[in-house]
Amino acid sequence: MNQTSSIIEIRNLRYAAHGHPIFEDLSIDFPSGRVSAVMGPSGTGKTTLLRLITGQARADAGTIRVAGSSLAELSRDELYVLRGRMGMLFQNGALLTDISVFENVAFPLREHTKLPERLIRQIVLTKLQAVGLRGAAELMPAELSGGMGRRVALARAIVMDPEILIYDEPFAGLDPISMGVILRLIRRLNDALGLTSIVVSHDVHEISSVADVVYLLSGGKVVAQGSPQELHSSKSEIVKQFVGGLADGPVPFHYPAPDYFGALLARDGDS
Amino acid sequence: MRKSRAMNLGTGLFVLLGFAALFFLTTQTTSSGISFHREPRYRVIAKFDNIGDLKVGAPVSMAGVQIGRVAAIGFDSRDYKAVVTMRLDAKYNQIPTDSDASIYTQGLLGGKFIGLTPGGAETYLKNNDQIDFTQSAFVLENLIGQFLANFSKNSGGGAKSAAPGTEKQQ
Amino acid sequence: MFADLWMGLVESLVRLGDIVRFLLRLIAQVPRALPRFQLIIDQVYNAGALSLVIIMLSGLFVGMVLGLQGFQLLQRFGSEEALGTAAAIGLVKELGPVVTALLFAGRAGTALASELGLMRATDQLAAMEMMAVDPIRRVVVPRFLGGVIAMPLLAAIFSLIGIYGAQLVGVQMMHVDSGSFWSQMRASVDLADINEGIVKSCVFGVACSLIAVYEGYYATPTAEGVGAATTRTVVTSAVVVLFLDYLLTAFFL
């Protein structure tokens, strides 16, 4: 494997869902060892991009290379091997609701290894300690708050020591304190474990404080990229609109629709 | 872990119950299958002209008391008769050799069974003996045919012309 | 009109093909799921042990009704002694497997479909995929096998309790002779009748479990979608069971 600085390379990606094109000719490199952020207005396919990177969805055209191997050429088993090197934090945590916090974190270990119980216990408690929830080990997922659930999911995502850690909207619906905790964890885990982090979010300020590189997606393309500082000082209209949180700009307020007056005047059934 | 133990116990009980039910159905509601207390038995055969719908497993009784079961039904292609093998309980070992075996029906629509009527001989049936005096199953169609024939005979000319075929056959 | 009908037919065929392909996928994963025996045991518990009470109660009442109706009918022909036979044949060959399957679809099938649907809706299945754990092998196959194992056992228990229900009414209340009740049953119920019942309930077990896990696994990940999947599980299972019952009965004749 050649030692490139990008662990994930996306080239000329095209993808459509239900007939609507989501990406047309998208190319992004995610540098290894850094925290990269993918930002953009809702509905620009940020989550879809994660599904493509992790092989949960297949691209219509273009290539996605993760750690040197092209996803389109992998068999199901090879894809699973590759996923063993990735961890992912889902939007709502996605903890398995029928087993305890401890068992949730232990789940990948029990599925993929034959480690003795004592060792599993040590690893799980270490990871729970890292997210500050060792005391919650015996609780059930339903007993956790949203922020705690996400931290447990984070512990689960790092239990197999992945090289790539992916966060899907890690701040959505969290109170400021939990948000701060997650932010600190993203940075700490990235630096301490030496992994590559990809954070998908639309929370401009939170991302600015943690990301090394930011990609701004809009209309299925990367419209801006660079450090958070570069983005803040960007002259581009769309970047200004997004970073400044303005209602009007290049991203229209209205969802595409037929002519307004025409629709109002139309009789039933002929619009 | 305690919850899982209780669940395993519940599952175990359920599976046990299920197989017990299956075992009971196969052994206790059917005549084939294994019976628990296998009493010593001996075999006796009898040949019938017609056994109707007598089935393997049907009871063999004497004076209304079940003393055995039909073990097998075969066909003798030399004299065109049905060969019925019966298994009789060994404790009923004093059945005269000249006893008579008839096929009866339980209720109007019930299954067929074999009834033995004792003869007067001093010797008793042993294993693999044959009962020589047999009376066939009574077949409903034959009975109706007979009834019609008698009916036409008794009621004279009018009925005779009404069912001429029946009489000729008799 | 005809176009709609035609499209409906094509749609059902597509669905049928999809379900059968799903079944093949499940079967392919069975060897890899078997070593995790504990997972299957848990599902036998969910599908079987938890359905036990409803199955036993229903079996008792169905048997009692059969005893009452059978007695009324057979009395007209003067052959009340055949009640045992009638009840046993009716339960073992038809009512046992069919009613058990319908109850199973309502009790265990809906539970399976909504559980899997919720796991889909809360990304639990996707999370497993991301942990390189095949949800088909880890979640779906054990549930499917649990149902397949539980069904014949439930049907046997149903039939057995039903026969005792019929005996309760016939012998205890209507005073049919206990000896002839059992001996006529023994004389005329064949092992083949019981085999027919077992084969039927095994087939129903595969069908009901398959429909439940299929509907749940592919449920639209919303509250409405899960509800719709649950409803479809019951409706499809009921129709398929009755249809298969006719096919199997014709086959065994």
Image (tube, coloured by chain):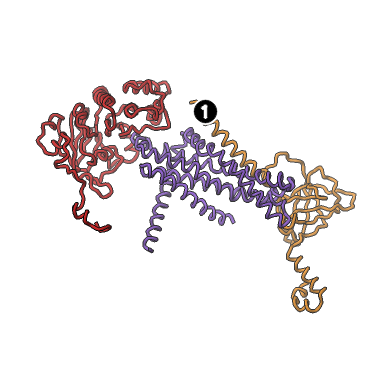
The front one of B26 and A75 is B26
Element type where label 1 sits in the image = helix
* The chain in red: A
Which corner quadrant holds the C terminus of chain A? bottom left
Within 10 Å of disc 1 (Cα), the crowding (few <14, some 14-19, many 20+) is: few
Residue on which disc 1 sits: B5
Residue C169 x/y as whole percent: 68, 46
Tell me which amino acid carries mark 1. Arg
Is residue A194 something one can see in this rendering?
no
- In-image side of C239 versus C187 (left or right): left
Please give the name of the residue rendered at 29% of the width and 26% of the height, measured from the top-left corner: A178
- Judge whether C236 appears above or below C1 on screen: above
Q: Residue at x 39, y 32 (%)?
A: A96
Q: In percent of the image, x 59 and y 56: which residue is there? A: C253
Residue C107, horizontal then vertical, whole percent: 50, 42
Quadrant the N terminus of chain A occupies: top left
The colour with which the image depicts chain B is orange
Position of B14 with respect to C81 (left or right) is left
Chain identifier matching the purple colour in the rendered picture: C
**A248 to the left or right of C117:** left
Q: Chain of mark 1?
A: B
Q: Position of residue A36 (x, y in %)?
A: 21, 31
